[in-house]
Amino acid sequence: MIKFEQTFMNFLLHHQEKYNRTYHFLILMDAVISAAKHIQQYYLTGALKGNWGLAGEVNVQGEEVMRMDQIAHEIVIHYLKTTERVIHAVSEEAEEIIPLDVDKGRYFFYFDPLDGSANVSHGLPVGFLFGIARRNLDGPEDGHLRAGKDFIVAGMFVIPTGTFTLALKEAGSWRFHIDETMNYVKPIRMQLPDDTKSWELSFNEANKYTFTERVQNWIAENENKYAFRYLGALAGDFHRLLSNGGMFMYPAIINHPNPKKNRPQGKLRLMYEAAVVSFMCREAGGHAVDETGTPILDIKPAKQHQRTALYVGSKPLIEDITRVLRG
Ligand code: FBP
């Protein structure tokens, strides 16, 4: 007997019908899925085709660009253009905002085409992260950069594992699995577990003594209570956190022995990294704050590549660290 699973598109069609939404969003999500599959294929064959190396360029963040970063960016922009539904896009790999269908577009698309660059040259898990906001339909649209709370959807593909998690505003975080026909199927609703037995802490241990004293003290008091896991790619670490609970954090770095490596504003990018996982975490019953204890989703971006410190995960832990951060 063949076991058939619900497909992603069938799930989305019913969601759109249930909330009386339009077909425009389906066209955009179809393009996102196509882009993710294309990136996955390039990544899987990357070693053979020599695409796992450096591109020989430095991006707007001052970081060396991986060839795969460029390939993934190009693929996403191609598929977004085919939709004629996107006003503009913000990409980690492009310095400026990318105008697409400015007049008749309906959505803003913020993305990190290949998160976890440090893992690329080893073929280890990386991610394609995105957040989508809709234009103002009730009046003039000024194209301002949207805060996470204005997202209608945020999602993440963990490549090359073939898993895809999508959060829909007030409709939950859902995980899909790739099947033998390369279709995403079998939606499972993700809810952070209340049972602390499976909870984990995830951060770059090598940076521990560069964090603020408050955060170092919190870690000293709590690190023996939970398992410790760190992949070094936000997508992979957050993917696991959604199942096991706990907290992922990339705090401000204020006391690094090499002052050039200090990151008082945090390392991760607000619009297409922190806000994306924070939106998905909220829809799975969690929460997320920055170094001041401010909810990540409330932060209005002043610049498209703005950085932030990030504490994301199970509500009791985030409330506990927020108490410490607010002092
Ligand atoms: P990019 O690779 O897209 O720049 O993302 C940043 C990132 O790699 C995150 O995925 C990850 O959580 C973090 O940086 C790892 O940083 P570090 O190597 O300093 O621990």
Image (tube, rainbow, N blue to C red):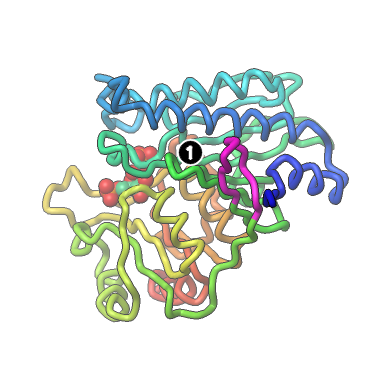
Q: Is residue 24 left or right of residue 321?
A: right
Q: Along the line of sight, which residue is nearer the eye, 68 or 303?
A: 68
Q: Is 87 rendered above or below residue 221?
A: above
Identity, as a three-letter code, of the amino acid under mark 1: Phe
Could you say whether the residue bearing mark 1 is in a helix, strand or loop? strand
Residues rendered magenta in the picture: 176-187
Location of residue 50 by image quarter: top left
Q: Along the line of sight, which residue is nearer the eye, 71 or 313?
A: 71
Q: If the picture is divided into quarters, which one holds ligand 1?
A: top left
Residue sitting at x 72%, y 57%: 171
Q: Along the line of sight, which residue is nearer the eye, 191 or 136?
A: 191
Whether residue 110 can be seen here: yes
Q: Along the line of sight, which residue is nearer the eye, 244 or 260?
A: 244
Is residue 282 rendered magenta in the image? no
For mark 1, what is the residue? 128
Residue 65, how many percent across, how many down?
31, 27
